Amino acid sequence: MVPFDGLKRKPVMGEDGDSPKCPARPLTWPWSAIWSFLTQRAWEDGNERQTGTVLLFWEQGRLKACLSDRDAQAVGFVTLEGLSDPFDELENALRSDHIDWRAHRSANKRK
């Protein structure tokens, strides 16, 4: 698996990044994008980041993941095709940044 150096905030004009602040990943945990999503407390520029959550659930015969990006106040869902290594699929989804993120309900209430 390709090394993953942490989540990156979407580029903003004039930002320079430092290394992200994230707890050391256990050696036996191969999914670094998931680890960063769950534990990284600062962006590469040093700004504070709220950690994310992942909820796995079974619905209509499919294993699914609900990702809650508390920092962006967004949720995204991923349908996991393979039961043998669903964490690999979730890792690839986070790395690809092709998750269909939607505003979290609580974000809509604040408007």
Image (spheres, helix red, strand yellow):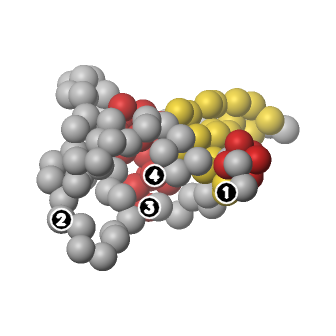
Q: Are marks 1 and 3 in contact (CB under 8 Å)?
A: no
Look at discs 4 and 1 and give the one toward the viewer.
1
Badge 1 density bin: few <14, some 14–19, many ≥20, Cα 10 Å: some
Question: Mark 4: which secondary structure?
Answer: helix
Q: Which mark is residue 56?
A: none
Looking at the image, which residue sits at the far left?
18
Residue 76: x, y in percent?
A: 63, 50
Q: Are marks 4 and 2 in contact (CB under 8 Å)?
A: no
In space, the residues marked 4 and 3 are separated at their CA atoms by 6 Å
Question: Mark 2: which secondary structure?
Answer: loop
Q: Looking at the picture, which amino acid does disc 1 mark?
A: Arg
Earlier-in-chain disc, 1 versus 3 = 3
Residue 105: x, y in percent?
A: 74, 45
Question: What is the number of callouts on the image?
Answer: 4
Earlier-in-chain disc, 2 versus 3 = 2
Circle 4 is placed at which residue position?
94
Circle 1 is placed at which residue position?
102
Residue 111: x, y in percent?
A: 72, 55
The answer to which of 84 and 55 lies nearer the viewer is: 55
Q: Are marks 2 and 1 in contact (CB under 8 Å)?
A: no
Look at discs 4 and 2 and give the one toward the viewer.
2
Q: Looking at the picture, which amino acid does disc 3 mark?
A: Ser
Circle 2 is placed at which residue position?
16
The answer to which of 90 and 61 lies nearer the viewer is: 90
Q: Looking at the picture, which amino acid does disc 2 mark?
A: Asp
Residue 77: x, y in percent?
A: 66, 48
Looking at the image, which residue sits at the far right?
60
In space, the residues marked 2 and 3 are separated at their CA atoms by 22 Å
Q: Are marks 4 and 3 in contact (CB under 8 Å)?
A: yes
